[in-house]
Image: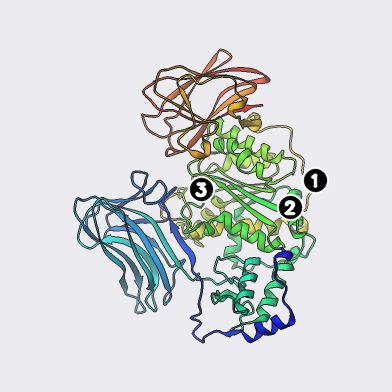
Amino acid sequence: MCNKIKKYSLYAAAVALALSVTMPSDNNFYVSAADLLTAEFETTNDSFTARGGASVAWTSEKAFSDECSLFVSERTAAWNGASREASSFMKAGCVYNLSAAVYQESGESVEMKFSLQYTDSSGETAYDQIALETVKSGEWFVLSNSSYKVPEGASNLAIYVETTESLTDFYLDLVKVNGAPSIIKAGDANGDLKVSSEDLSILSDYLLGASSDIEQGADINKDGIIDIYDLIQLRSYLVTPSTPSVSGDWDNYQENVSPQMLQVYKDGLYRVGNTERIRNKISNAQNGEQVNIAYIGGSITAGGSSSTPQNCFANLSYDYFSETFGTGGNVNYINAGMAGTSSVVGNLRADNDILSKNADIIFIEFAVNDQGGERFKKSFESLVRKCLSQENEPAVVIITLCQKSGGSNQDWMAQVAEAYDLPVISGKNAIMNAISAGTLTWEDYGSGDTIHPGNGGHKLIADCIGYYYRQALRSENETDAYVIPNSDVFGSEYSTARIITIEEMKNLSRGSWNSGTNNPSYSANGFTFSKNGSEPLKFTVEGKGIMLLFQSNSNDSMGTVNVNVNGITTSVNSNLQYTWGGLDGDIAYYQPESGTLDVSISIKDPSTNFVLYGIAVIE
């Protein structure tokens, strides 16, 4: 990092002092706009809920960006539409750039409106127009206002899209809000909600007159003036760790929260587990070594229903680790969350998506997406063992979340954690116990549906992760060297499963299958049934077993394949729930000893679809 920091002479410092700027008394300071909300509806409703009698549903039927949008239907009044809270990222008196893409196909032009609902200073519910436009039938249109000011004294903010008269169904996509963040980070000179060497460069350029753009966070010492003293303090912050080392006085660290919230954190730390590996990784980070933090899981890990990727629990907890233990640019972030996927898929994706990137700390989150069957339990345990067995000895942390009903796979996942002496961050215990105690409600945690956390929930999970780090560093939780257990809970025979390349498939005959898939990320080594004949895909390979990674959906067009290995046939069905057209996986064959596997994969009904994203061999 140091060789990237510009060196300044005493003359330059004097120039910088001369160019220092006093902030106006009303603090209406220039700020570079941050992305406060980006709702693309690719994995969830992104915290948008129905307004009035309308119904909202995430759909792939229409899209303005990427592949999905939000469908708004069953409207009984013009004001019915799609809405989400906005108080978490907008505030009274501030100016924002807002936009929302809309589409309607009523057959005629319709006047559509982007609006704000709020409580005014007298306590009454009020409404304000953000944008109003006439939208043609069958064409996407972007409702926008680049300089919308939230009314003074407004609270309980909610943005929503409606019509003025028509009751037509419509689609909503790519809702964006840009503006100054409601919370200013000291040292954040460029408005990206982080503090890094880039802020140092921005602040230096500003003081030397090379740039006129600056974020309020540049006033790091908060004296109302941006000057050379802020530059010195920011540089010191970036170069010198501001918290105790692993051997520091963590036993006397005081949690700066209410007793009620401290209990939430305690409930969220289901178990601390063996701390040797996590303490080593924290020590490495504090010594300036590179540390890679990886997250693998479903849509919640991917950031589903957080207002922006920056508000996802994964990014928030990465930021905490980087700012608390890093020395400036030496902590890297890997988010391998994928909507609609289970640990069966996670186990097959892990090699390429996290382990090949030398992950040092790995968070595993599948408690909502997994089910209770053998393929899930064995895949989850296999994923845990696969991660623990890497040469760089990563620290592995299990995260268990839940639905609004409390439904979760925490119970059996905790059995794996106990057997392997791993930590468990229990979002389930944190929120459900808090609800029982009256500390929080599901609305404080959730996004508007019954599964995904909103910004509040993502922050809660990240805070529980931060609490785990601090507890792991207490002397009472220091442990002996970590040893991977020899025994299994449910079975870890899939831990050696890996996706093989086409070149590794000996004696390959494609039959009625074409090379490639409908997913660019899983095309190079995949196959798609052509519906032109019924000849099987054949090859031979060495190993103990075969697993398939495939596209699935709850749809009769999704087919079943018969997988014959060494004369034994197993059927694998792709007409399954809970993947919404995404990835799923299943075991096709297993034998205790490695040997030659003669594999034949044929479609059961040639009129159906089957997409093989990859074929895994258990070695």
Q: How crowded is mark 3: few (under 14 residues within 10 Å), some or many (20 or more)?
A: many
Q: Distance between the residues labelled 3 and 1?
A: 32 Å
Q: Position of residue 372 (x, y in %)?
A: 53, 35
Q: Distance between the residues labelled 3 and 2?
A: 29 Å
Left or right of residue 37: residue 428: right
Q: How far apart are marks 1 and 2 (CA)?
A: 13 Å
Q: Which mark is residue 481?
A: 1
Indicate whether 178 appears above or below 300.
Answer: below
Q: Where is residue 403 in the image (x, y as percent from the top left)?
A: 47, 48
- Asked if the residue under mark 1 is in contact with the one under mark 3, i.e. CB atoms within 8 Å, the reply is no
Which secondary structure lies at badge 1? loop
Indicate whether 83 appears above or below 348.
Answer: below
- Asked if the residue under mark 2 is in contact with the one under mark 1, i.e. CB atoms within 8 Å, the reply is no
Residue position marked by numbered label 3 in the rendering: 402
Residue position marked by numbered label 2 in the rendering: 281
Counting residues from the start of the chain, the first of labels 1 and 2 encountered is: 2
Viewer can see residue 492: no
